[in-house]
Image (tube, coloured by chain):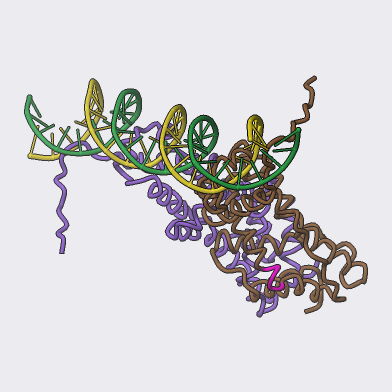
Chain colours: A brown, B purple, C yellow, D green
Amino acid sequence: MTQVIDKPKLGRKRDASRDTDIMNAALDVLAETGYDGMTVDMVAARAKAGKATLYRRWPSKPDLVLDAVACMKAVPLDTLPDTGTLRGDLIAMIKAPSIQDAERKLKIMAGIVSMISRNPELAEAARAALVEPRAAANRIIFRRAIDRGEISADTDIETLCMVGPALATYRTLMLQLPVDRDFLVRNIDAVILPAAGVRA
Amino acid sequence: MTQVIDKPKLGRKRDASRDTDIMNAALDVLAETGYDGMTVDMVAARAKAGKATLYRRWPSKPDLVLDAVACMKAVPLDTLPDTGTLRGDLIAMIKAPSIQDAERKLKIMAGIVSMISRNPELAEAARAALVEPRAAANRIIFRRAIDRGEISADTDIETLCMVGPALATYRTLMLQLPVDRDFLVRNIDAVILPAAGVRA
DNA sequence: TGTATCCGAAACTGTCGAGTTCCGTATATA
DNA sequence: TATATACGGAACTCGACAGTTTCGGATACA
């Protein structure tokens, strides 16, 4: 077995703040140009870092991207709304800060989809960072609606909590249209609530 | 103004069948490796053609891909089902041949999404070939359901006819799960029909 | 104060792929 | 039959980018 050798703590320490700077730069470039359009030089320039600094921390471009995507999940959806009605909760989920965050995530998603099908690790990271948090939040909101008797107990929550994200993704990636408040409210009132069996 | 000069018809004629062979090869490679993973040599090899033959017909790789995507739209959705009920029509739309065709189109979609945001011509071609035909078919089916009084006249058809495609796209691109018959039927019964106000 | 590591910047190397050219052969017109 | 073009195939050029190395300067520890 290989021994784990304690490194002597000589010399200048690594500046940990460069990690987040570089990963944020990577996510920006990813959102703007996509995985294949992104060059390591772009990321270094954006982060005002040397390329050597990047390669000291990540062994390759795919590893950097994987780490950057995975680290997005750190930011948890801030405390869920609890308005007392399903519609109230769903509407409260699409407030300005949350919507802007989602817009960037959709662009990042567009930038890595082609990679996802060929890189299982990246696929898993994207699922954990981009799909699961939103689905989990919706799941809780629907669950509460069942608990208070607002919707039927045999509602297919797993399917329903994908409808919003799926429509938003389709609209961005395929239709190239903005995911604005009107669109989101229409989805809630014309699709999600009726599908859940809430009176119009 | 520039004159259009009639070319003298000397020499061997171009084999028009190579066009479709090459474009089909391009779509195959696109579905398998994505736009950036696709090389012109791959396409040429797949079509058993010389690279020179490709460049004699298209000036660049983007032009070839654009043309290949645009030419998909040629195949029209064969005669729409008319079963007398909305559910019958929607179920009839997901028969085996149609579902296999859709699977390939989803792979192609995954291969070009990152390009779509940076190439308006390709975005338009993708919309015309991949989005619009399915939406148009759904539109007709919902319209007929309104005409026969099965669903309300003020149903938001434009939103509803995107729900199926959006869920299928999301499932393929983000979740990496198969779009099988069970999934499609569940979408119809748990989301689309209830959203349209059809009794369960 | 000396040594080891970090930093940003820039030069360098090696690979890969888009696009071009050339070859021998096939097929059309005149 | 002579000429012009198409074909598949292979060799070639050239630019872009991943990854490495080198530099002068900064920072930590002993």
* Viewer can see residue B108: no
Residue B121 in the image, given as x and y percentages of width and height? 42, 59
Give the vertical position of B124 relative to B41 (above or below): below
Residue at image point 92% right, 71% down: A149
Residue lying at 58% horizontally and 62% vertically, measured from the top left? A172
Please say if B110 is above or below D23.
below
Which region shows up in magenta?
A95-99
Q: Is residue D25 left or right of residue B26?
A: right
Q: Looking at the rendering, which quadrant does residue A92 occupy?
A: bottom right
**x 54%, y 60%: residue:** B131
Per the picture, the main secondary structure of the magenta-coloured stretch is: helix
The residue nearer to you, when weighing A8 against A167, is A8
The structure residue drawn at horizontal position 77% and vertical position 21%, both measured from the top left corner, is A2
Residue B40 spot, x, y in % from top left: 41, 38
Q: Nearer the viewer, residue B163 or A176?
A: A176
Q: Position of residue A131 (x, y in %)?
A: 72, 55
Q: Is residue A41 visible?
A: yes
Left or right of residue B6, residue B153 in this image? right
